[in-house]
Image (tube, rainbow, N blue to C red):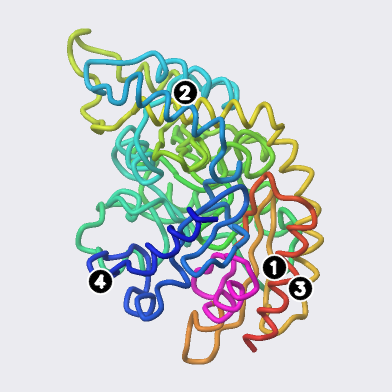
Amino acid sequence: MKNESTVLQRASTIKTEAYWMPFTHNRYFKKNPLSRTLVRAEGAYYTTAEGKRLFDCLSGLWCCPLGHAHPKIAEAVAKQVRELDYSPAFQMGHPKIFSLAERIVGLAPAGMGHVFFGNSGSEAVDTALKIARTRLIGRERGYHGVGIGGISVGGIAPNRKMFAPLLVQGVDHLPHTHSAAEMAFSRGQPKWGAHLAEELERLVALHDASTIAAVIVEPMQGSGGVIVPPAGYLERLRQICDRHGILLVFDEVITGFGRLGEPFGAQRFGVTPDMIAFAKIVTNGVIPMGGVIVKPAIYDAFMTGPETSVELFHGYTYSGHPVAAAAAHAALDAIAEEGSFKRARELEPVLERAVHSLKGEPGVVDIRNIGLAAAVELEPIQGKPGARALKVFERGMEEGMLYRFTGDTIAMAPPFISTEPEIEAMIEKLRVALRAAR
């Protein structure tokens, strides 16, 4: 308890002004920073600088489903720092990154063959786009990180607005797949909406297939508010891409490594893309790491020319970082040993039952779920977009819950280690917060 007291005391003296926080209302936050300053994490819980214990309703930012301070991962990281703390990524390699690539290919859908490593989901997406090249097709409400390429194919207006002059030219977008009138309060995949994939045929007719390199979509749109693909939609995209010789890229930064109860969303939905971007869960969020898994034909297309020439002029100082590789191996060990994919499938109906019990609560206009992820969409307060969700978020913290809010949507993706009572409590506390925010 002495150490706990020291940590809390030290946090109370922190000066916040110098740090420009990402995706944060900085001025609002810094009026009362201690309530939202986290000083400790263990298992499925955070502790704030005020000593408040919070259940981690979104597994960090979708990335820590094995729980915080996982002993196996912590031990692997400490050991790796002493053994090989850094290895140049250009013209050199180290054993753990080669074995990690083999391991990830083994988890991926059949037919994948090679992995290119980066350090985040944003870098993974920009890597996939560089590999694809020429014209790209994204989707409205899609989120593909904050690189210029990712923003260009992304479809969230505020992310694009400020950087419009920098965006990649020639990018087009499919419509998003959410229609409140047709699919509100769907459980799992909506039955309506597969026909929206036909919009790709319209874009092919507009641009000509020969000018389109790739289509990139999230199997489940996570940051856009847990938008679940309609039954048959991804299958139809795959068919259209095959017909016209277009690459299909899945952004699985959120869905990769178990969030949908399978190694990848591709397996959950039974659709194999040509490339998969991943990050987050691969190291349980402990060390930044991301990457792209590609089919052998894509890799082979680059392996031309003299064997002493660089095939792809792309990479990062920290690509395949040894400490990240050690963390990833340990995370994948834990996933296997703890039966995390199976656990996520077991908890899915628990979350679905609980979250849909919120239908009819004040301000709730839609509820969506799949795998161990769910979202509750709220009616905006007139003239104050996002205000209702902020009220719910703040009341949730008072109730010991750390929810995630984007706009007027509350998203939840609890850790795989959660118990059924914890998930039920997460929803009941949300009910309290919704009623308080009316």
Q: Nearer the viewer, mark 3 or mark 1?
A: 3
- 321 lies above or below 433: above
Q: Kindly indicate whether the residue at mark 4 contacts the one at mark 3 (C-beta within 8 angstroms).
A: no
Percent of width and height locating residue 181: 68, 73
The mark nearer the N terminus, 2 or 4, is 4
Residue 400 magenta-highlighted? yes
Amino acid under disc 1 = Ile
Residue depicted at x 53% and y 34%: 273
Q: CA distance from mark 3 to mark 4?
A: 39 Å
User: Which residue position is annotated with label 3?
Assistant: 358
Task: Point out the tag, 3 or 4, that comes first from the N-terminus.
Answer: 4
**Disc 4 vs disc 1: Cβ atoms closer than 8 Å?**
no
Secondary-structure class at tag 3? loop
Q: Quadrant of residue 129?
A: top left
- Magenta extent: 390-410
Task: Report crowding for label 3: few under 14, some 14 to 19, many 20 or more residues within 10 A (C-alpha).
Answer: some
What's the distance in space between the residues labelled 2 and 4, CA to CA? Answer: 47 Å
The reply to whether the magenta stretch includes residue 263 is: no
Residue nearest the viewer, comparing 173 with 184: 184
User: Which residue is rendered at x = 46% and y = 32% of the image?
Assistant: 275
Q: Earlier in the sequence, mark 3 or mark 1?
A: 3
- Based on the displayed image, in which of its 4 quarters is residue 314 positioned? top left
Task: Report the side of 308 relative to 47 (left or right).
Answer: left
